Image (cartoon, helix red, strand yellow):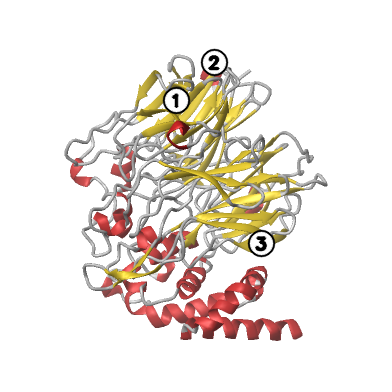
């Protein structure tokens, strides 16, 4: 009875704070009450509060057939993260601009929790009997190691040049209420762990795809699943959700061991994945204000990126590095609205660990408003213990850009930059000569080799331009290193832009010199009606027209290589935004195997699914198996909701 009373009081305070926008109450709740509310979300009538807000602010349109708006029932089929995207910077942004982030979250929580029957298939998909537990092998980090080389050794895989052609689909798993496959899975022994945008964490038998266990999280799972092995040999699953909350989960019971907010401000977002070393977790902090700035009513811009270090056992914060100072009033934008700065410099790559030098390396994005800082479009070296800056290398200065620049909005700065983030994780390489080098890929289409020990201009060993890049082009999520060779995917969408020639494909570079070894050119092998192309980047989120998925799957506008690549001793695996997964001979670029995943499929878990664009996460390779996540529609690519498991035939 006492607990129910306390829960009721907390809910009342939460709702009143959101409704009244009382900053002092909200600040207190952010600091002291958030983790408590998340832990007890199942006991709180949050959905009822969300329903009340929906009735007050949304029902006039969505309950009125004459408005031709999606009904509550239709909205309930979407994942919470998709609803939040629509409310934060998508189609519903103008209508939801007057609501607080907490109010928007409650509405999304209500809608996403109101669908019934979406998981009726689970009972028949459960494993029987449960497979024996094993603690190895472990594939449990974004970069397949501290250095983010994304390299899988011969000891870890049996897939070779002479058998890769026999890779065949062994099982598939479809995720309801999902259109984007974002979270790179992890493997511990015979189990594969994967999270989805609907907030479900699944444990699957990696050989059959049956469900060993599952649990519902409060919000969608965005990051890769990182496996942290503590000093006492305990393992934890570490991941971030769409509310920028970091979770540590017991892989055997799926109990939440701890959770911690990694928000630096109301616009914080975790897009990259979390790195683990020596009992610490290193969390990259990005932001979505870059998209919110596309709204004329948005006061721009007050948020910035950074890195947060947490104690892996407790979740307690150890240190935080802020990419810019706190924003202050700088004047007015072209519409006479307040303009704040500095801002931006998001960190959306998985941090790289350098144990020899006790350093951590991250890349940053552009500034959103002026004044520009020397931490944007940069590689930053931080001390692992303190978070202090050891050095920084800025590739492009003065790159100030936000989504207002896509539509000539008032928030777009004068003389804007081109949005050339360092999004791909930095690779720490040890070449055959013994020299250690940092490789960094930028959305500008350029690759840099940096000396981690040099100063100033001497830091750049070589730089190689592969394409002209765009705000959605160039190098996105992750390169791979095998031997002395660097493998670089280039996204480059088609754009009506004077002097721009897209060069999407996979490039192999000599790590010593940057010399091009070979190139695979990605092409669209179908006739696309260019009048039906999606809007540019973030503008597509606010597009009001309906998309004909049949036409979209028949011929994808996007076909570049945005997802992270993965290399073995003999092969490179790379996937495209058209849903094609390919395996190349890493020495000469010969295409040895490919599959089109953008197809309908009757999944092994008993429901219908569909593959789509392959973006963000790379492939997981272990033993005889290749695991591919297919589907990504954030910028108008091909939606999808399947995990595909391929096995070599013996």
Could you tell which of marks 2 and 1 lies nearer the N-terminus?
2
Q: Secondary structure at mark 2?
A: loop
Q: Which mark is residue 161?
A: 2
Q: Which mark is residue 594?
A: 1
| Marks 2/1: CA–CA distance | 13 Å
Instruction: Give the quadrant of the C terminus.
Output: top right
Q: Observer-nearest residue: 38 or 312? A: 312
Q: Position of residue 630 (x, y in %)?
A: 47, 40
> What residue is rendered at 58% in x and 85% in y?
13
Q: Position of residue 510 (x, y in %)?
A: 46, 20
Mark 1 Cα-neighbour bin, 10 Å: few <14, some 14–19, many ≥20: some
Q: Which mark is residue 306?
A: none
Instruction: Give the quadrant of the N terminus.
Output: bottom right
Could you tell which of marks 3 and 1 lies nearer the N-terminus?
3
| Marks 3/1: CA–CA distance | 40 Å
Residue 627 seen by the camera: yes
Which of discs 2 and 1 lies nearer the camera? The answer is 2
Which of discs 2 and 3 lies nearer the camera? The answer is 3
Classify residue 367 by image quadrant: bottom left
Q: Observer-nearest residue: 221 or 292? A: 292
Q: Is residue 612 above or below residue 437?
A: below
> What residue is rendered at 47% in x and 33% in y?
459
| Marks 2/3: CA–CA distance | 43 Å
Q: Observer-nearest residue: 284 or 588? A: 284
Q: Please indicate whether residue 483 sits to the left or right of residue 584 in the image.
A: right
Q: Please indicate whether residue 236 sits to the left or right of residue 283 in the image.
A: right
Which of discs 3 and 1 lies nearer the camera? The answer is 3
| Contact between labelled residues 1 and 2, with CB atoms less than 8 Å apart | no
Which residue does the numbered mark 3 point to in the structure image?
A: 259
Q: Is residue 562 above or below residue 66?
A: above
Q: Is residue 340 above or below residue 458?
A: below
Q: Position of residue 95 (x, y in %)?
A: 33, 73
């Amino acid at each position: 009875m006492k607990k129910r009373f306390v829960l009721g009081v907390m809910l009342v305070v939460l709702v009143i704070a959101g409704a009244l926008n009382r900053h002092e109450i909200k600040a207190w709740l952010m600091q002291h009450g958030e983790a408590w509310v998340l832990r007890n979300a199942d006991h709180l009538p949050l959905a009822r509060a969300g329903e009340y807000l929906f009735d007050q602010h949304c029902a006039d349109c969505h309950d009125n057939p004459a408005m031709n708006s999606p009904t509550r029932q239709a909205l309930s089929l979407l994942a919470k993260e998709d609803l939040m995207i629509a409310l934060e910077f998508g189609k519903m942004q103008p209508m939801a601009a007057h609501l607080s982030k907490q109010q928007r979250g409650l509405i999304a929580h209500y809608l996403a929790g109101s669908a019934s029957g979406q998981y009726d298939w689970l009972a028949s998909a459960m494993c029987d009997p449960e497979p024996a537990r094993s603690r190895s092998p472990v594939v449990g980090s974004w970069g397949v190691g501290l250095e983010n080389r994304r390299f899988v050794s011969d000891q870890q895989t049996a897939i070779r040049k002479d058998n890769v052609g026999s890779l065949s689909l062994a099982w598939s798993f479809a995720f309801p209420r999902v259109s984007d496959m974002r979270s790179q899975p992890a493997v511990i022994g015979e189990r594969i762990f994967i999270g989805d945008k609907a907030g479900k964490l699944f444990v699957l038998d990696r050989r059959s795809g049956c469900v060993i266990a599952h649990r519902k999280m409060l919000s969608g799972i965005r990051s890769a699943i990182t496996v942290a092995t503590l000093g006492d040999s305990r393992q934890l699953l570490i991941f971030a959700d769409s509310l920028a909350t970091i979770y540590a989960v017991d892989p055997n019971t799926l109990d939440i061991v701890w959770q911690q907010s990694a928000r630096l401000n109301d616009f914080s977002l975790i897009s990259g994945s979390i790195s683990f070393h020596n009992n610490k977790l290193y969390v990259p902090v990005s932001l979505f204000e870059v998209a919110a700035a596309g709204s004329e009513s948005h006061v721009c811009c007050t948020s910035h990126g950074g890195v947060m270090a947490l104690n892996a056992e407790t979740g307690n914060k150890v240190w935080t590095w802020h990419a810019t100072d706190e924003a202050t009033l700088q004047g007015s934008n072209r519409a006479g609205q307040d303009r704040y700065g500095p801002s931006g410099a998001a960190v959306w790559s998985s941090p790289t660990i350098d144990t020899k030098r006790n350093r951590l390396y991250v890349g940053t994005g552009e500034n959103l408003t002026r004044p520009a800082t020397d931490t944007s479009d940069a590689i930053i070296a931080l001390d692992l213990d303190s978070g202090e800056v050891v050095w920084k290398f800025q590739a492009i200065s003065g790159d100030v850009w936000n989504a207002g620049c896509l539509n000539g909005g008032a928030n777009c700065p004068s003389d804007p930059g081109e949005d050339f983030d360092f999004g791909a994780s930095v690779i720490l390489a040890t070449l055959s000569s013994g020299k250690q080098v940092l490789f960094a890929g930028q959305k500008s289409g350029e690759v840099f080799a940096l000396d981690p020990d040099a100063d100033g201009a001497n830091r750049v060993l070589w730089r190689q331009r592969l394409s002209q890049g765009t705000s959605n082009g160039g190098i996105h999520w992750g390169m791979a290193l095998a031997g002395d060779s660097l493998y670089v995917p280039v996204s480059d969408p088609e754009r009506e832009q004077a002097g721009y020639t897209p060069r999407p494909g996979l490039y192999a570079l000599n790590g010593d010199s940057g010399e091009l070894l070979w190139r695979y050119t990605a092409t669209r092998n179908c006739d696309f009606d260019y009048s039906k192309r999606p809007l540019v980047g973030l503008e597509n989120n606010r597009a009001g027209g309906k998309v004909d998925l049949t036409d979209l799957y028949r011929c994808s506008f996007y076909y570049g290589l945005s997802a992270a690549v993965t290399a073995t001793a003999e092969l490179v695996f790379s996937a495209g935004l058209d849903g094609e997964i390919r395996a190349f001979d890493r020495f000469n670029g010969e295409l040895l195997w490919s599959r089109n995943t953008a197809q309908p499929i009757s999944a092994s878990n008993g429901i219908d699914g569909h593959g789509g664009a392959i973006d963000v996460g790379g492939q997981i390779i272990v033993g005889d198996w290749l695991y591919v996540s297919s589907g990504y529609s954030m910028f108008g690519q091909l939606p999808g909701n399947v995990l595909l498991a391929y096995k070599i035939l013996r």
